[in-house]
Amino acid sequence: HELLRQFAADKLREMEAEQEARDGHSSYYSAFLQGQESRQHEAEQQEAADEIAAEIDNVRAAWRWSTEQCRATEIAQSLESLHLFYYARGWVQEGQEAFQSALACMQAGTSRQGDEDAWVIGRLQARLARFSHRLGRHPEARDLLQSALETYDRLPDRAPARAAAMRGEKAFALFSLSVVLRGDGEYEDAQQLCRESLEIYQEIDDLPGMAMALKHLGIIHGSLGQFEEAQQQLREALRLYQDSGDPYGTANTLNDLGIVAAGLDQYVPAKRYYQECLAIRRQIDDLWGIGTALNNLGYLAYLDCEYAEARGFLAESLAIQREIGDRYHIANCLNNLGAAACALGEYGEAADFLYEALRSAHQIGAHPLTLEILAE
């Protein structure tokens, strides 16, 4: 009995020592991620992302421990920086799984939740929605964002510093919901939400948020064929991103300016925008961005009757989108491949591309894209 008691005591000490070590490890890397957060909106964005990538195994272990132990403070410290990293790198499947685990952990303690826990839950929901949307789970993204907004509205007013943060979170959720609605063809509602988001970002003087909202307003105007308004807002967003030294935002806005130029049949400037965008995205290792830039270059080559060149760009883009699992852009790329194959007289191959595109777009409820594919 004495030997068994001694063995149990030794094991308990080992477990306590392991927990202490894991707690310290988790605290250290939560603080590390928090320290990288502001850098991911600035000129040091690439350096910050590289530093996170170099420590990614430790970051994963720390996040996993924080979520398993439901360490809300550390989850709150880490979540924005980790979301930015996963999103910019195109690691959306891993981001989805990591944030889903954290949300499940936080929601499991509903009986003891206070305002702080609800605040963390809302922030997790808004970022999980971004990953869900990129993976083509539009209804899930809507539900998460609406729940986050309801949570923010229920929380009491705070001191000025926290009030500004809460306003910023509401603006982010409104912006993200606007992105989902635009993808589903609900342009008027998307525009209204994006304007509300922009107004909040302007009130709290959040330059990255202002640039993000202006860029999306430009995209919505482009979707409505209002190209002059789109160019104006996108150029203003580009100026803000360039002034802050944000390569990710700069590349995204160059891409959207290329889309607008292509819509105006200005193929030479459109190609220049896309090439500049692709160069930046390769430099910052933005896998998803590389895939969309290649898709846009492929579609532009198709419009310019360079069908073989178009197919090369589009095939490379499709391989990337399949790797990521982005169902919307898989469908979009397949549609463009179908158009290029049709132009080359390869009708059987074109039909295969288009039927697969149609199934994917219909399943995720991307109605404008579904109509484009039906027309093709």
Image (cartoon, rainbow, N blue to C red):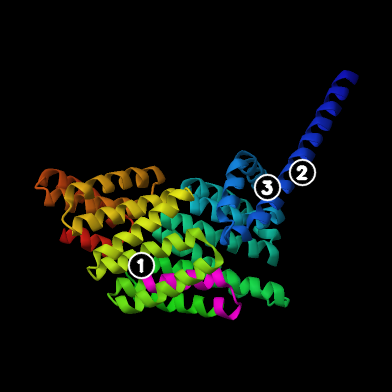
Please provide percent x and percent y for residue 344: 11, 48
Task: Compare residues 190 and 16 and report the one nearer the observer.
Answer: 190
The reply to whether the C-beta atoms of the residues labelled 3 and 1 are less than 8 Å apart is: no
- The vertical placement of 6 against 190, above or below, is above
Q: On the rendered image, what quadrant is the C terminus found in?
A: bottom left
Task: Compare residues 26 and 256 and report the one nearer the observer.
Answer: 256
> For the residue labelled by badge 3, is the local secondary structure a helix, a strand or a loop?
helix
Q: Residues under labels 2 and 1: Cα distance?
A: 46 Å
Q: Earlier in the sequence, mark 3 or mark 1?
A: 3
> For the residue labelled by badge 1, is the local secondary structure a helix, a strand or a loop?
helix
**Which residue bears the numbered disc 1?**
257
Residue at 50 percent of width and 67 percent of height? 241
Please provide percent x and percent y for residue 81: 60, 55
> For the residue labelled by badge 2, is the local secondary structure a helix, a strand or a loop?
helix
Which of the 4 quarters of the picture holds residue 64? top right
Q: Residue 66 bears which disc, if any? A: 3
Q: Count neighbours of disc 2 (C-alpha within 10 A) and say few if under 14, some if 14 to 19, many if 20 or more.
A: few
Q: Is residue 202 magenta?
A: yes
The reply to whether the C-beta atoms of the residues labelled 2 and 3 are less than 8 Å apart is: no
The residue type indicated by label 2 comes to Gly
First to last magenta residue range: 201-219
The reply to whether the C-beta atoms of the residues labelled 2 and 1 are less than 8 Å apart is: no
**Which residue bears the numbered disc 2?**
24
- The vertical placement of 355 against 126, above or below, is above
Q: Residues under labels 2 and 3: Cα distance?
A: 11 Å
The residue type indicated by label 1 comes to Leu
Residue at 73 percent of width and 42 percent of height? 25
Closer to the eye: label 3 or 1: 1
Q: Earlier in the sequence, mark 2 or mark 1?
A: 2
